Image (tube, grey):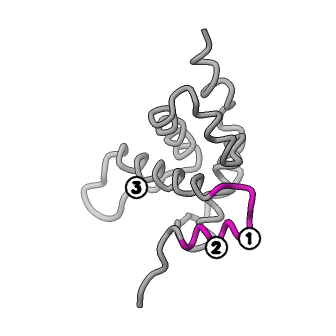
Amino acid sequence: MRKIAFIDVVKRICAKDERYDIEAYVFIREALDQTIKNFKKPDNGPDRHVSGQELAEGIRKYALDQFGPITLKVFNSWGIERTEDFGEIVFNLVNAGELGKTDEDKRDDFKNVYDFYEVFKKPFLP
C-alpha cells in the first residue's frame, strides 16, 4: 500500500485549516529534521524525542539560517506570528498522522517560548 505524500497531507490540512500557508508546514518539517540532526543520536534505537520548546528553539535557529533579517516577513506571510503557531502546525501534523507525540506533549509546550520581535527583528536593527 502506498503512503500518501507529505505535501498531499499538508494540502488536506490546509483545506480544513486555512490559517497557515503550505510552505509553513514544509518549513516546520524541515526545521524538525534539522533539529533532530543537531542532537546526538542514541547508540541504539530510534532518534531522541524533541520537546516543543526544543523544537521552537530549533525553528528559531533554522529560520535565522535560512532567512536572516527577513524571517519575520516570511513567517507573517505564512500566517505565523508567535511560537504558539508552531504548536498549532505541529499538532495539525500529529493529528494527520505525519508526526508522533508522547502523552506529555501538548500545544502549550509552544506557548510564549520567545518573543518574535526580540529574536527575529531586534538583532538586525542598527
Q: Are marks 1 and 2 in contact (CB under 8 Å)?
A: yes
Q: CA distance from mark 3 to mark 2?
A: 29 Å
Q: Give yes or no for contact between labels 3 and 2 (Cβ–Cβ under 8 Å).
A: no
**Residue 10 on the magenta segment:** yes
Choose mark 3 or mark 1, whichever is in front. 1
- In the image, what residue occupies the spot 64% across and 49% down? 86
How many numbered discs?
Answer: 3
Q: Amino acid at mark 2?
A: Arg
The numbered mark at residue 81 is: none
- In the rendered structure, which segment of residues is drawn in magenta? 8-21
Which labelled disc corresponds to residue 48?
Answer: 3
Which class describes the residues within 10 Å of circle 3: few (<14), some (14-19), or many (20+)? few
Q: Quadrant of residue 65?
A: top left
Q: Which residue is mark 2?
A: 12
- Mark 2 nearby-residue class (10 Å; few <14, some 14–19, many ≥20): few
Q: Is residue 92 magenta?
A: no
| Label 3 element class | loop
Rendered position, 94 above or below 105: below
- Does residue 117 lie above or below 61 as drawn? above
Residue 37 picture location, percent across and down:
35, 48
Residue neighbourhood size for the residue with mark 1, other residues' Cα within 10 Å, grouped as few (<14), some (14–19), many (≥20): few
* Residue labelled with disc 1: 16
Residue closer to the observer: 10 or 114? 10
Disc on the earlier residue, 3 or 1:
1
111 displayed left or right of 41: right
Q: Nearer the viewer, mark 3 or mark 2?
A: 2
Image coordinates for residue 56, horizontal then vertical, percent? 57, 43
- Tell me what residue is drawn at x 58 percent, y 30 percent: 70
Q: Main secondary structure of the magenta part?
A: helix
* Spot occupied by residue 110 in the image (x, y as percentages of width and height): 66, 46
Left or right, 60 with respect to 13, comes to: left
Q: Earlier in the sequence, mark 3 or mark 2?
A: 2
